[in-house]
Structures are given as C-alpha cells and as structure tokens.
Image (tube, rainbow, N blue to C red):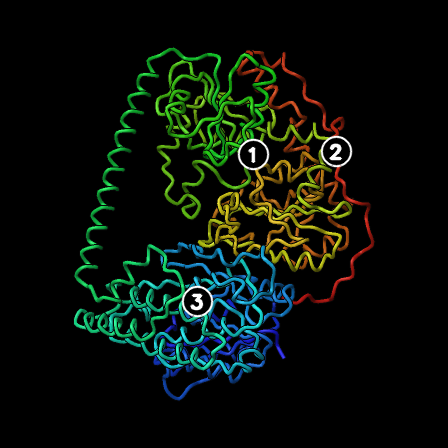
Amino acid sequence: MPRFSVIVPAYRVQAYLPACLESVLSQSCPDLELIAVDDCSPDACGALVDEFAARDPRVRPLHLPENGGPGRARNAGLKAATGDYVLFLDGDDTLAPDALRAIADRLKETGEPDVLVYDYARTYWSGEMIRNQSAEPLTEQDPAPFRLADRPNLLNLRMVDWNKAYRREFVEREALTFPPGRYEDTPWTYPALLTAASLATLDRVCVHYRQRRRGSVHGTTSRGHFDVFEQYDRLFAFLDGRPELACWRPVLFHRMVDQLVTVYTRRDRLPRAARTEFLRKSRAYYRRYRTPGAPLPPRSRARHALIRLGLHRTYGTLRLTSALCRRAVRRSARMIRSARALALRLHYRIQLRLPLRKGHAVFSADRDQGHGCNPGALEAAFRSLAPHIRTAWIARPEHHHTVPPATRRLTPGTAAYWTALARSKYVVTNTEFDALPNKRPGQIVVQTLRGTPLKHRGLDLQERPAAARDTDFAALLRHVDQWDYVISANRHSTLTWERVFPGDYTTLEYGCPRNDVFQHATSADVTRLRETLGIPAEAIAILYAPTHRDYRRTQRTPLDLERVADRLGSRFVVLARAHPRHGGPPPASGRGDPHLASLAAPTARVIDVTGHPSVESLCLASDALVTDYSSIMFDYAGLDRPIVLHTEDREAYEAARGTYFDLRSFPPGAIADSEDELIDIFATGHWRGSRSAQLRSAFRERFCPYDDGRAAERVVRHVVLGETDTALPPVVPLTERHPVASLAPSPLPRIPQPAQAPH
C-alpha cells in the first residue's frame, strides 16, 4: 500500500501533461502511485499516459470509454486508489519539488488528520509565479489537528480539490464522490471540510496552478456556467441530510452568493443573451437558500443586494460610479506624485549649486538594502578612523533597523536623500549600476563591487545573452566613468575588474573589507551567533549557499536538503541560504517568495537563513561551506574552514554564464558531482581531510593575500586621510593570521551509507 495516490484527470492537456506527470514521479518521496485518467481525450493524452506507464511501474493508466468531465475521471481514480492518502492534480498543473515529502512530514507531525490543506502558487505563461495571496488560514502556529469549527476561516480559501490531501479511509467512510458538471469542486470540497473529524494545514506551496493564456474551462464564455446552480442544489441537499451541520448554512449561503456574483460580473463567463436569465435565476436561489445568522461583511452588501433585488442597472451604475471615483483618485495621486517629483528635482538642482560638504559621506549596498557587505565595513571604518566625517546610509524603510544608531538613515527618493547625493564628498556603493545623477567636481565615488569574480561580469556578458538579458552596456560604462576608486581583494580581481569595467579609476588592491570581521571575531561571538540561529552546541553546521542559474527561468535548489540532512544524521545541521535574487527577508505573514518553494521547509536540521541580514555572521556560525559557483567561496576561504563544491550542472552553468577559471583544476576543497557524492564526502570525513586542507591552503594563498582584518582601514587611510601606500599598515602574512576557529567537534567515525541511495 503506497503512502499517496495522486489522481490526474487528463483531457485536452497534451502540451502540459508530461510536465505534470514528471513533477509527480520526480518527487523526493517516492512512496506513491500515480493514477493517470485519460478522460477519452481527443488529443495525445491517452498515448502520453501509456508512455509514462511503460517507463515507471508506479503509473497506473485508466482509459475511460467516453468523456464525462473531471468529476467522473476523479471518481474512476478514487475507485482504483490504494494509498493511505489521496491527492488530486489537474493535468495542466504541477507539484512543487519536494511537495510530497513536506506533506508526508506534516501528516506525521499532526497525527494523520482526515484532511490536510496546503498552499499553491499561480504560474503564468510569461514565466511569472505569484503565491496565493489569501493563505492566512494556513498558519501552522495554532494547535493541530483541529475541527472546522476551530478554524472556520478555512472556508475563505479557494474551494478546489487539488490543494488538499484526503485520508482514503475518511473518503470511503463519508462516501464522498464528485458529481458531473463544470463546478464539481463545490459539492466535494465543502462536505469534505465539514465532515472531517480532524484537519491540519501546511503553510507551503505544494502546487503550481497553471494560468493558461487561453483554453481555461472557467474562462470560456458559455451557458455551461449555469451548472453552478445545480452544484449548490447538491450542496444544500447534503446539508439537509446532516442536521448536525445546519449551523454552517448561513456561511455557505454567503459563499454561494459571492460565487454567483463572480460568475455574473465576469465578462468572460456568460453570453450576453444569458446574463438576464442568470441574474433572475440567482435571485430565485437567493430566496430559496437564504439563511439568516452569519454577519455580512460591509464590502459584500452591494453584491448581495444585486442578487437579492435583481438590480442589474443599479448595480451597474454603482460599479461605474465606483470606477470613476477610483480613476479620479488615481489621477489625483499621479498629479501629487508628479508635483512631488518636480519639487524634488528643483530641490536637487538647488543643492547642486551649494558647496560640497567635505565632512559628509553617503553609503548604500545591494540596491538600497540594509547595512552590510563592503560598504558596511567601510562605513564602520569611516566612523572609527575618520570621526570628523559624518556618515549616512541609504536604505528602504524596512531595512532601517540594520543601520547603526550613530549613522544617519536616508530613505530613497526623499529630499534628504537628494541632498546627500548632491553635497556629500564621499559616495560608497557596491552596485555597478548605481550612479549619481550629476557627479560634481570634487566628489569621490568608491566602488567596492561584491567579492572576487568567478562568473563573467561587466562587458564579458556581451557574449552571454542568457546572463546579460537586457543589460544596457552603454549605461554601465557611463556609470564606470564616475568611479574614482575600485576595491580589489586580489590580483585576479584587479586584472578582471580593469578589463570588464574599463575606466580611469584607481584600483585599491587592499583586500575585501567585509571579511575583516573574520579576523576580529572571537569564539564567544561564534557561540552567540550559533545560539541565535538555533544550532545545537555539538552539531556540525553546513552553510549551503548556491548561486543564481541564468539558464533557468524558475529557480530551484539543486539539492534535496531534507534528504541530505536525513542521510548525514542528527549531528549535522544545514543552514540554507537562497541567492539574494530569489529570496530576502520573509514577509510579515511568514510566507516567503514562491521561488523558494523548492527550498526545504525549516526543520530542526534544515534552517532557512535566506532572510538573515549578514552573510558574514552565517559564515562565522557555520563549520563548513557547500556552494557551487558563488563568490562566497572566496570570502569563506579567509576563514580557513572547509569548503565543498557541488557542481552537478557545471556544463550548463558554464555555457550560460561562463567562468574565469576552471574550478575543477583549482578548487578550494572537495568536489561533488552528485548529491550522493556530496553526502559521501561528509559521511567519510573527506570534507575536512588533509587533501581538502591542502587545496584550501593553495586557494587561500591565491585569493586571500590581503584579507588580514585591516582592508577597510587601508581604504579609509588612503582615500580619506590621504596616506600613501608606503604609510599604510603592512599586510599580515598568511602564516601569522589566526581567524576565529570553527566550533565543530572532533572527527567522528564514518557514517554507514547504503550502497545505492534512492531518489
């Protein structure tokens, strides 16, 4: 008996069905059966189902003799299902990577509930992905399992069958089946939630709900939408047969009215000639099933009045009036914004004519994010070594809390922001596309860039269209012409920057300022950071930081982190940090970016640290780094801690982005070509063996010659205090540097591994 039965009805979805079936079969939880139901589809769906069945014994094909709609196809799948839990998936949708593993873990954690409700994200034909915006009821903070009466707001979610896992014994006990028709989800989903003795939620995207450009059933204009009336007849008949559920009638009545209004007001649903008939029938259903008792939200009163009174013209007038009001408000807002922009431009022009403030410096990093990276290290050095310079940091309001109290906070677009750009003598940034609108004579721009380059940057991207995308190289060069100084960590960086960013600036090959903290931190600092992140005292913490894949439209982590953690055992903890282009601080609701849906959900051994403001702190807290082509390896080498590379897609990455040298010929440590090899490297202790230490030593000597903890000091002394290179602090030799040590326990015996690990 498999753990899951995934039922996929297929009708006229031949272009999307292979991706749907593959998303199920490639799940990291392989204990499943895939019941693919060909609903007598006139296209190639039946042949595709048979092809997948021939390739994988977990696929059970069903071919219906005639087309009966998705409801009957799902019923046929239910009769054949043998799994503990049943899931439904439309033939043009897909399961998110690792979704079944997350569902299985949540089911076990919540005591095998009758129904588990999870989240979804809409995926558009343009490649855009947007997570469900109404998923507040899916919070996992409340006790679970529960009854619907404890969390009635679950009824506010989209009433579909494919965002839930159903215990098969529960479905059979309640004799739940799908009716025929277009709106077959209604008399299935509501009864399932109302009769479930136990419910649970999973706040994670498990389904990618495809938004087709054309061809969607609900987006087709026809009289078929009159089916919604028959489905609500079935639903209220079900309630009539269950007197104990009568308390839910007012709520379901409101849901019915909302859906009828939606069908009526959507221009792509009903033929023009059928609209009056639909409204008349809606009014009859309003009177038939009206049940007082549930409070009506104020925003729904006009919608209910439309159905109750049949006031089509009045409702249309109200909608038109409302639209005109909104248009007037938007126009007024645009006028206000235009006036504000004009005033700010005038303010900036005035500030440009005032004298430079020689005692002011303004900093920014990563497109106005929080205090950190190389500009952050330099800002701290300015305050320490040049206290006569007043520093200010440009950041969006949500990042102001990261700025030190002694530093002025500037919000982009404000008058203070434009004043700082116009009159500050020093401007420090790390983004090559940050430019001053009008750089003044006497202003000094310090460009720190971000780390040592491995992947192609600057003008080299002209030959890499997948990575360059819409880069304006002429604008890039105009920005480069404003730079006075460029910070370089090593000779390799100097030679690369001066070629890919050609300009008249001076290169300061002084080291990487953001890495100074590695030489100054103490064991007490490391212990505090580990406690903050929730890392057990005796655990080995692996920081996993992959880079962006230019050849992929949708990003996903190359590793199954839960599987890696499970295979390595309880003594290892994985700190998972997505690339900044895909993640960031999680929103207040706790639901992250849909691109992170493939990242394992946070557990005791896989901790999502994407939103952590300081990557340097994560490096200090970890005992080893696992990465692929990210420049973080050059920073981490300065810590003199083990580095392991996972380069499974090396050919694809190098073809799309290109690298400046072959990592395999000069690696910072052990290299894994697959997930199993990576697991074996840690299981056998090779990750911190003598060979890995030798490779790291050579890598460190080449790329960390100046990272002795005084890089920021050298920059400030040269740029601000005017000291020559001969007067700057000498570089501490590598043999005399003592970065804070890892807290990893001593080597342990080899972890036994199976001969062939399942995927």
Q: How far apart are marks 3 and 2 (CA)?
A: 50 Å
Q: Is residue 16 left or right of residue 31?
A: left
Residue type (three-letter) at the residue carrying disc 1: Gly
Q: Which of marks 2 and 1 is nearer the N terminus?
A: 1
Question: How many other residues sit within 10 Å of disc 1, few (<14), some (14-19) or many (≥20)?
Answer: many
Q: Is residue 570 left or right of residue 598?
A: right
Mark 3 and mark 2 lie on one chain; the one further toward the N terminus is 3
Tell me the residue that label 1 is attached to: 451
Q: What residue type is labelled 3?
A: Asp
Percent coordinates x, y for residue 364 in the rendering: 48, 29
SS at mark 1 in the image: loop
Residue at image x 52%, y 46%? 586
User: What numbered label is drawn on residue 524?
Assistant: 2
Q: Position of residue 9 (x, y in %)?
A: 43, 77
Query: Vertical placement of 260 versus 506: above or below?
Result: below
Residue bearing mark 3: 93
The amino acid beneath tag 2 is Ala
